[in-house]
């Protein structure tokens, strides 16, 4: 139908105008952008290949995840048998299993019954793979509790997921905009930080585990005796590093209980501050309700006992509990500088990494190379678009002008949608823009050729134009929907550059369908109303 009611025409023009205006903040001065409504302050971020930056590929230490799971399994076995008053002669590791050997005369049937409860204690009854996290077997007075490979893989997968969120919080907290953080395979993480210049600083910042724990100091024996012989089974020897500048001048040993009173997972805030009375930098922290209750109970029950503040298995300080700490907050001191206290507070707020990360690959893209990419991509887009504009105008005359206007609106709307979702524009994304220009023109070519065929068959101007739009619409819809499905598949299955190309292409298909179906038709209808032609200039 070659008719547009006033409300339809207004809706088409307003849609195009609003979406195009979303792209305006990308070219306006920042002072102007600040005056816009908050919803209009949308912008695209240039990717690593356009503005330079740091590319890192990290790997979660699966062996550490395995070690931690086995240690937790050993502690569970020890606790279950102790609570059941069953004495063990030996408790150790064998591969992926914890092996417990009972003393003579102990109740083996009871031990087997209690140990079989352990798999239901570990992360729920089942792992996400549908397998038990541990299996229990018996041979005489020897019991073997084995951590399954499926359970370990599940723990590694969850460690990667948690690490991604921790890295995202740490990077965003520094003010870096739009980092690209993606999972790769089972245990790897891709991190791209556009605009960053110092990879070592980023590596140090995200590589720190920042695992905070509050544990009691074991006073059952002197730490020197524990070093000379062997510490109790429930305790471990940890050290406090005394530094002069960046140099460690002394390591002070402590005998620390393995069980943590409270961990950093219960922290809801941590801020660096200067303690004027002690003339030193400290970190003020605050627990959530659960952590506050546990901390209050522990400090109430252990007045006049020392407890250790431990970060990444290193003792920060070991003060004595002088009175119960009931407010759910406290203070960490430990020879901090202004910079180190601020960094540690930030790491504690972001959360601890579940496992250490190793850096598998590192690349730095210079800003000059990024500028070369922008220049090359922009030149390619301009040259390609110029050829398209000239071809359309030379081939279809006035109708080619309509098509060129529609293509311009199409590209501007695409940038508006990219800005709306805060997309990162990469070099493959620019390729998607260029391809969109060709696709948009292709839709107009189909319409104009059908109009030309209708006119050559002797139909009137109105009938030819109406027939051209109507009969070409099925082909246009089929072609664009097919490509949209392809771009969706590329987006969900691809990574990195492929994903950026698929996103730009998909949005370009949506805007192409809008301009081909409505905007180009509206321009033709306006021409018919204003000039009332007797023939079609095709």
Image: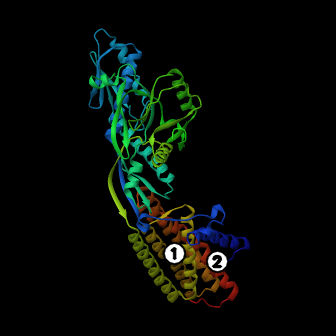
Nearer-N-terminus badge (2/1): 1
Q: Residue furthest right?
A: 6
Q: Position of residue 167 (x, y in %)?
A: 45, 49
**Nearer to the camera, 49 or 500:** 49
Residue under the image location 42 percent in, 32 percent down = 126
Query: To which quarter of the image does residue 192 belong?
Result: bottom left
Separation (CA) of disc 2 from disc 1: 16 Å
Residue under the image location 33 percent in, 40 percent down = 249
Q: Position of residue 92 (x, y in %)?
A: 28, 25
- The numbered disc on residue 440 is 1
User: As displayed, is residue 463 above or below residue 269?
Assistant: below
The number of callouts visible is 2
Is residue 50 visible to us here?
yes
- The numbered disc on residue 522 is 2
Q: Position of residue 44 (x, y in %)?
A: 52, 65
Q: Quadrant of the C terminus?
A: bottom right
Helix, strand or loop under label 1: helix
Helix, strand or loop under label 2: helix
**Nearer to the camera, 284 or 143:** 284
- The numbered disc on residue 468 is none
């Amino acid at each position: 139908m070659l008719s547009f009611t006033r409300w339809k025409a207004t809706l088409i023009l307003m849609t195009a105008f609003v979406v195009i205006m979303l792209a305006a903040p990308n070219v306006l001065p920042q002072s102007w952008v600040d005056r816009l409504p908050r919803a209009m302050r949308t912008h695209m971020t240039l990717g690593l290949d356009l503005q330079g930056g740091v590319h890192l590929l990290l790997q979660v230490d699966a062996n550490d995840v395995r070690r931690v799971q086995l240690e937790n399994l050993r502690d569970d076995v020890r606790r279950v048998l102790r609570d059941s008053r069953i004495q063990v002669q030996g408790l150790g590791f064998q591969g992926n299993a914890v092996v417990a050997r009972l003393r003579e005369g102990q109740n083996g049937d009871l031990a087997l019954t209690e140990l079989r409860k352990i798999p239901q204690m570990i992360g729920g009854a089942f792992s996400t793979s549908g397998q038990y996290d541990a299996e229990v077997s018996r041979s005489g007075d020897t019991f073997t509790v084995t951590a399954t490979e499926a359970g370990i893989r599940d723990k590694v997968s969850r460690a990667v997921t948690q690490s991604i969120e921790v890295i995202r919080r740490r990077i965003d907290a520094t003010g870096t905009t739009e980092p690209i953080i993606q999972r790769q395979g089972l245990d790897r993480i891709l991190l791209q930080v556009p605009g960053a210049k110092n990879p070592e600083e980023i590596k140090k910042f995200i590589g720190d585990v920042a695992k905070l724990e509050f544990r009691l100091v074991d006073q059952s024996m002197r730490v020197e005796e524990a070093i000379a012989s062997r510490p109790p089974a429930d305790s471990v020897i940890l050290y406090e590093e005394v530094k002069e500048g960046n140099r460690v001048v002394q390591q002070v040993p402590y005998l620390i209980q393995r069980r943590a009173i409270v961990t950093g997972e219960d922290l809801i805030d941590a801020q660096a501050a200067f303690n004027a009375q002690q003339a030193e930098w400290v970190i003020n922290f605050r627990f959530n309700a659960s952590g506050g209750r546990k901390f209050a109970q522990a400090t109430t029950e252990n007045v006049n006992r020392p407890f250790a503040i431990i970060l990444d298995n290193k003792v920060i300080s070991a003060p004595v509990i002088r009175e119960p700490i009931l407010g759910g907050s406290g203070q960490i001191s430990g020879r901090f500088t202004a910079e180190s206290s601020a960094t540690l507070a930030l790491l504690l707020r972001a959360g601890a990494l579940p496992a250490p990360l190793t850096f598998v690959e590192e690349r730095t893209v210079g800003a000059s190379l990024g500028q070369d990419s922008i220049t090359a991509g922009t030149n390619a887009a301009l040259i390609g678009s110029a050829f398209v504009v000239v071809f359309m105008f030379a081939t279809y005359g006035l109708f080619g002008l309509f098509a060129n206007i529609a293509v311009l609106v199409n590209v501007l709307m695409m940038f508006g949608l990219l800005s709306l979702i805060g997309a990162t524009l990469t070099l493959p994304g620019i390729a998607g823009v260029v391809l969109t220009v060709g696709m948009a023109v292709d839709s107009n070519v189909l319409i104009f050729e059908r109009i030309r065929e209708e006119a050559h068959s002797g139909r009137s101007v109105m009938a030819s134009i109406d027939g051209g739009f109507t009969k070409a619409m099925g082909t246009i819809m089929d072609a664009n929907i097919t490509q949209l499905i392809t771009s969706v598949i590329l987006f969900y299955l691809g990574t990195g550059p492929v994903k950026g190309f698929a996103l730009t292409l998909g949005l370009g298909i949506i805007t192409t369908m809008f301009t081909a179906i409505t905007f180009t038709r509206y321009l033709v209808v306006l021409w018919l109303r204003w000039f009332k032609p007797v023939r079609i200039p095709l």
